[in-house]
Image: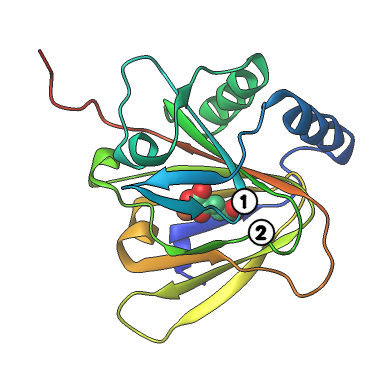
């Protein structure tokens, strides 16, 4: 385990509420298809994704790939609960829908410059359990944990500094899963 850089709270939401939240996300998110044109090339994302942020928040990752959407009532409610629990502010959320075991996210760190030097990320999971794999950037240390329905994974800033993470595809048949990573994007340089 990457020490205190990761903390996992299983059952942060109770099962009955998880079912409701998952169903609402599936039906309310108005999921885009996963084909994108990047620098003139067709690119297929191995999951469905939406990005929501407060007005004025600009994020290069989303700029390159995703339109910025407003917060729905459900997303606003989830954000408020996390802010109250963690006593931290979030102004954006990336929502990933892994439709089945073929959908995945590859190795990365959420360390874009817009997140600043100390990015705190709160990650909520609903639906099927999936493995969350991590490996240290500068050593062979690695491991994984299971992100189950209703779990909250808190990634402290040091986690992004020293570790990469991924959600690998699953060889076992697995149902849909929706993950939300709440972030705080720092204001960009003033324009105009
Ligand atoms: O699905 C997950 O648990 C992780 C998603 C993720 O790494 C991300 O959105 O940056
Ligand atoms: Fe990530």
The residue at 86%/36% (across/down) is 19
Badges 1 and 2: C-beta atoms under 8 Å apart? yes
Residue 111 image position (x, y, % from top left): 31, 52
Residue neighbourhood size for the residue with mark 1, other residues' Cα within 10 Å, grouped as few (<14), some (14–19), many (≥20): some
**Residue closer to the observer: 108 or 10:** 108
Residue 92 image position (x, y, % from top left): 44, 29
Q: Is residue 155 above or below residue 17?
A: below
Label 1, ligand 1: CB separation under 8 Å = no
Q: Residue furthest bottom?
A: 140
Q: Is residue 98 above or below residue 64?
A: below
Disc 2 marks which residue?
103
Residue 36 image position (x, y, % from top left): 48, 44
Regarding residue 155, the answer to whether it shows in the image is: no
Instruction: Report helix, strand or loop for mark 2.
Output: loop
Instruction: Report helix, strand or loop for mark 1.
Output: loop
Q: Is residue 128 left or right of residue 29?
A: right
**Residue closer to the observer: 57 or 43:** 43
Query: Could you say which quadrant of the image residue 160 lies in?
Result: bottom left
Task: State how far apart marks 1 and 2 are (Cα).
Answer: 5 Å
Label 1 vs 2, first from the N-terminus: 1
Image quadrant holding the C terminus, namely top left
The residue at 42%/44% (across/down) is 37
Regarding residue 144, the answer to whether it shows in the image is: yes
Q: Which mark is residue 166?
A: none
Disc 1 marks which residue?
47
Q: Is residue 135 above or below residue 12?
A: below
Q: Residue furthest left?
A: 192
The residue at 41%/62% (across/down) is 108
Query: Could you say which quadrant of the image residue 97 lies in?
Result: top right
Residue neighbourhood size for the residue with mark 2, other residues' Cα within 10 Å, grouped as few (<14), some (14–19), many (≥20): some
The residue at 26%/39% (across/down) is 114
């Amino acid at each position: 385990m990457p020490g205190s850089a990761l903390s996992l709270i299983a059952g942060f939401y109770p099962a009955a509420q998880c079912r409701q939240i998952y169903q609402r996300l599936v039906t309310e998110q108005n999921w885009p298809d996963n084909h994108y044109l990047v620098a003139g090339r067709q690119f297929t994302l191995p999951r469905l994704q939406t990005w929501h942020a407060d007005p004025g928040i600009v994020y290069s990752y989303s700029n390159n790939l995703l339109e910025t959407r407003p917060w729905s009532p459900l997303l606003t409610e989830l954000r408020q609960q996390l802010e109250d629990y963690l006593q931290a502010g979030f102004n954006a959320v990336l929502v990933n829908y892994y439709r089945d075991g073929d959908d995945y996210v590859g190795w990365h760190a959420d360390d874009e410059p817009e997140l600043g030097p100390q990015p705190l990320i709160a990650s909520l999971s609903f639906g099927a359990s999936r493995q969350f794999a991590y490996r240290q950037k500068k050593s062979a240390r690695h491991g994984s944990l299971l992100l189950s329905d209703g779990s909250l994974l808190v990634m402290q800033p040091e986690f992004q500094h020293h570790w990469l993470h991924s959600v690998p595809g699953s060889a076992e048949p697995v149902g849909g899963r929706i993950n939300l990573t709440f972030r705080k994007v720092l204001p960009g340089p003033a324009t105009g």
